[in-house]
Image (cartoon, helix red, strand yellow):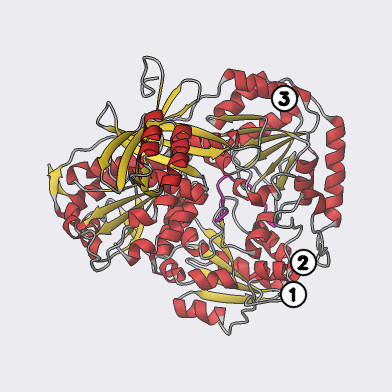
Amino acid sequence: MSNTSYVIAVYVENKSGVLMRVTSMFNRRGFNIDTLTVGETERPEFSRITLTFSGDEDDLNQLVSQLKKLYNVKKVEVISGDIGIRRELMLIKVRNSSETRADLRDAIDVYKAKIVDYSADAMCLEITGDTTKIDAFIDNMKPFGIIEMCRTGIVALERGPESILTK
Amino acid sequence: MKLSGAEIVIETLIEQNVKTIFGYPGGTVIDIYDQLYKKSDRITHVLSAHEQGAAHAADGYARATGEIGVVLATSGPGATNLVTGIATAHLDSVPLLAITGNVANNMIGRDCFQEIDIAGVTLPITKHNFIVHDVNELADTIREAIRIAKSGRPGPVLVDIPKDIQQAKCEFAYKAPVVKTAGEPAPEDKVIEAANMIADSSRPYIYFGGGAVRAGAGALISELADKIDAVIGCSMMGLSELPTKLDRFLGMQGMHGHFASSKAMAKADLIIAIGARFSDRSTGDAKKFCAGARKIHIDIDDAEIGKNVKVDLGVSCDISDFLRKLIEHVDYKRNPNWMTKIEKLLEQEKEFGYGDDFLPELAVKAVSDIVDDDTEIVTDVGQHQMWTAQYYEFKKKRTWISSGGLGTMGFGMGAAIGASFGTGKRSVLITGDGSFGMDMIELATAITYHVPVTVVVVNNGALGMVRQMQNLFYNKTYSNTTLDRKTDFIRLAEAFGCEGYRASDIGQFREAFAKAYEAEGPALVELIIDKDDMVLPMLRPGGAYDRLILDKEDRI
């Protein structure tokens, strides 16, 4: 069976050690997690973990049921591509020089990236988008020379008026 | 009233109807032990020789009674010594509450004397665990831990209590014993789907496991089998839920299962799995496993559905509720051709035995004859375990206690003690010279407390199960499996403080075992057997059922 990338949102109790319980389960069950972000939600007692994971449908079902078994997990929802808004943020530091500056600015414009730090020999850029956009931007930056970069991993929400917590 | 944390621990356990706990004292649980001493008229503490033995005892207590088993240990090594016991309970879904002391909250993280992050250590082997940081939350944490351990698919829960929490005081009020959360009712549409699949089948096989034992679903399984003309088999964890001699029950299937049971499963066109998890010891190669059969899987744990084997219909719900509804919905039917095939398999099975003079078989059957029907049969892990599983005639529910999932050598002696405390009756431990080497120290506990445990040490001077695999698959290279220790088990028993008997034929064994079984407290029988006795049939690990190993010379 072919591997697909899934985005899963998990509401967990906002307590110390909960993230470790979730990641420990992934490790024990041998799940291949690609990205994982965690942060506050509209309800302070819960945190939301957004993770992307590659596998087939059986793997997905197994991952979801194993997540649901964890005591601190309150809600698990697979965010499908059709109704999900997915975003990722990246900060990237690239080499800057008088010869490359114009080309660099063109790329920044096309991708609607932002310059957040600037010096004569380096620029720090911020870009938001889905994974393919970020990947393409990285490819574009390679010829200029990437000094350092970091990505947040995917965050995702479903379209429409509801929260998955109350769904 | 204001009580100290330590007092709250004990009062909450008493409130939750815990009568007996197993444990071992140490620096960070002195406060709790102080309270145990003061309240010893209301709760019994059993002092083991090693924390691992206490954990297995709590496990054996839970398996024998269906109630929660409780173990108490100190921080650091006391806590880490529980790990194998907790993991054993986890893999076999046993409701266990492990309470550990820890260094005071303000000392945590400084690598203090006997400090360990036991919550971190036990994360992958508990259903859940807690560290108590506030004495006001202590009682409710223990109650919640018990509820989690007993509810749904049972399992171990650990509560780590720092020393300052045991000494802090707060208000305590009694609450009612927690009620375990009920399983989901069976959805009607799935019941009808299952009934239709049964109607379409002509060779149904019901395969049940430990989940059926936890739910006490034996009678319903047998009723369903009668109505749809199915045969029944079980995993090792399912043993004793149905009487061995029940019609339609072919016994244990799997790696060392009965020939007819394993073969019938392979030939079935419909497998109805109930509270079983298709472990590798049951299925061999999961991809080849019963490839021609449709499969229904009913389990309380949703994560088991489709985990190991792909099924056509999977339902996670209360299995008794599902069975009751299914029996109601399903049509009465007969499968005469299937029954003829089963008859033939049972005939064939008789040909593959060792014959009439296989000492391990005769000995287990002698134990069957001699003991009372409600005697708990406890084993360690290895060949003796499989022989007991194969040849013992179970008559009563919950009389089989054995480490299935984790396969823990050294489980038996503690578990037998716990089982006897739970039932108030005699237990028989069947162990091997290898396993007994790991847990014999708990014989001291059994003797101290006059626990009626009859120990049978099946001695082949080797680690027989590994030796058997070395014989069959590793060119008889017996690397580190020949023990031939100089241990004199009879004098050892005497040194511990009980009678010991040696037997090397079935006559001697019968006589010795009968005497040992009548003893007031523990007694030991050593049975000498041949190093090259094997457990047969055998499914090659990862193999398929069309190629069972049936005799000693059969190498693939």
Q: CA distance from mark 1 to mark 3?
A: 47 Å
Amino acid type for the residue under numbered disc 3: Met
Dominant secondary structure (helix, strand or loop) of the stretch shown in magenta: loop
Q: Pick whichever of labels 1 and 2 is earlier in the sequence.
A: 2
Label 3: few (<14), some (14–19) or many (≥20) C-alpha neighbours in 10 Å:
many
Amino acid type for the residue under numbered disc 1: Lys
Q: Is residue A127 left or right of residue B345?
A: left
Q: Nearer the viewer, residue A81 or B104?
A: A81
Q: Using the image, name the chain to which the residue with label 3 belongs.
A: B
Q: Pick whichever of labels 1 and 3 is earlier in the sequence.
A: 3
- SS for callout 1: loop
Number of numbered labels in the structure image = 3
Task: Determine which residue is flagged by label 1.
Answer: B476
Task: Check residue B358 in the rendering and tell me which mark sits there, or answer none.
Answer: 2
- Labels 2 and 3 share a subunit: yes
Q: Nearer the viewer, residue B329 or B21?
A: B329
Q: Pick whichever of labels 2 and 3 is earlier in the sequence.
A: 3
Q: Nearer the viewer, residue B282 or A58?
A: A58
Q: Is residue A42 visible?
A: yes
- Labels 1 and 2 share a subunit: yes
Task: Determine which residue is flagged by label 3.
Answer: B197
Residue extent of the magenta highlight: B391-404
- SS for callout 2: loop
Q: Splitting the image into 4 quarters, where does residue B195 fall?
A: top right
Q: Quadrant of the C terminus of chain B?
A: bottom right
Mark 1 vs 2: CB contact within 8 A: no
Which residue does the image show at 61% across and 57% down from the upper left?
B371
Q: Percent x, y for residue B170?
A: 13, 44
Nearer mark to the viewer, of 1 and 3 = 1
Q: Residue furthest front?
A: A99
